[in-house]
Image (cartoon, rainbow, N blue to C red):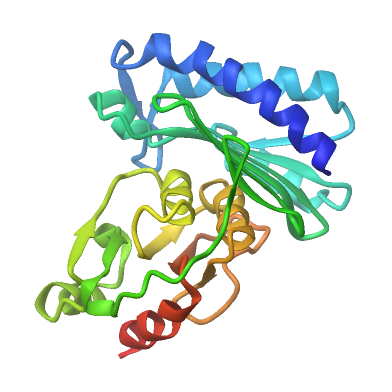
Amino acid sequence: MLSMLEQLRELVPPLARQELLPRYTRVAASLKTDGSVVTEADVACQRVLADALAARWPHIPLLGEEMDAAAQQRLLDDSAAGLWCLDPLDGTSNFAAGIPYFALSLALVQQGEVRLGLVYDPVRDECYSAARGHGAWLNGEPLRSRACGLPLSRCIALVDFKRLPPALSARLVCDTPYASQRNFGASALDWCTLAAGRGHLYLHGRQSLWDYAAGSLILAEAGGRAETLQGEPVLHVGLQPRSVVATLDPALFGPWRDWIAG
């Protein structure tokens, strides 16, 4: 797995830079049937990555965000041998609007578990990666959980209000438990921002497999904790969206989870 991860670190960043940066702020965005934004960069990057991965690992199929749902489900139904899960451009709305917070996210899923994860931010040239049971890294440097020494009331939280239950959103606004809140708009990169210690708390109401597969492994291997609003493991190899409650510092997880639960 570590050898495979090293190959991904060499393969993915240059292709992502090649396909994404020249198109940044220079392509028109359109809407998919679910109302989300897609650009030429999403499609082009997925095509190039699919070809590159197939050339090295022809036995592993690819599930990409820019595939239709029926094709995605067929791959999941026959995923016992493993598959790649790719979001070629996480944060497409940011990308199209000129906001420099977007990334490529890639995970290897085998037997219901994420074995490898890589999230690459081409603007900052930051490559986050992890291998299950072996650790997580940012540009080759280990990522490790550390006690922040802060109470919940002094923490910075990454919170996406848009997809939360309305009652929870209202509580967060009217009875704010943390010091400050951010919402950056790229889920896979949010997981990694947390794993790197750039913030303390995370809350999101609705993520797809390609949003959380790589990032959830990177946070877990960095020593962080995460579960859904229902107290279940976040990872579920399926198309049903999942919610996220997470912290990097394990000592913060209980207070954060308990406050959310009311």
**Residue 82 to residue 16: above or below:** below
- Residue 138 appears left or right of 33: right
Q: Point out residue 247 in the picture as x, y percentages from the top left corner.
A: 44, 68
Query: Of 136 and 226, which appears nearest the observer?
Result: 136
Circle count:
0
Query: Of 17 and 64, which appears nearest the observer?
Result: 17
Residue displayed at 44% across by 78% down: 253
Residue 33 quadrant:
top left
Query: Of 159 and 225, which appears nearest the observer?
Result: 225
Residue displayed at 73% across by 18% down: 52
- Image quadrant containing the C terminus: bottom left
Residue 69 quadrant:
top right
Residue displayed at 29% across by 64% down: 157
Residue 70 quadrant:
top right
Q: Point out residue 4 in the picture as x, y percentages from the top left corner.
A: 81, 35
User: Quick one: which residue is furthest to the left in this view?
Assistant: 174
Q: Point out residue 19 in the picture as x, y percentages from the top left corner.
A: 51, 14
Q: Point out residue 241 in the picture as x, y percentages from the top left corner.
A: 50, 60
- Residue 55 appears left or right of 101: right
- Image quadrant containing the N terminus: top right
Residue displayed at 46% across by 51% down: 196
- Residue 99 appears left or right of 146: left
**Residue 153 to residue 135: above or below:** below
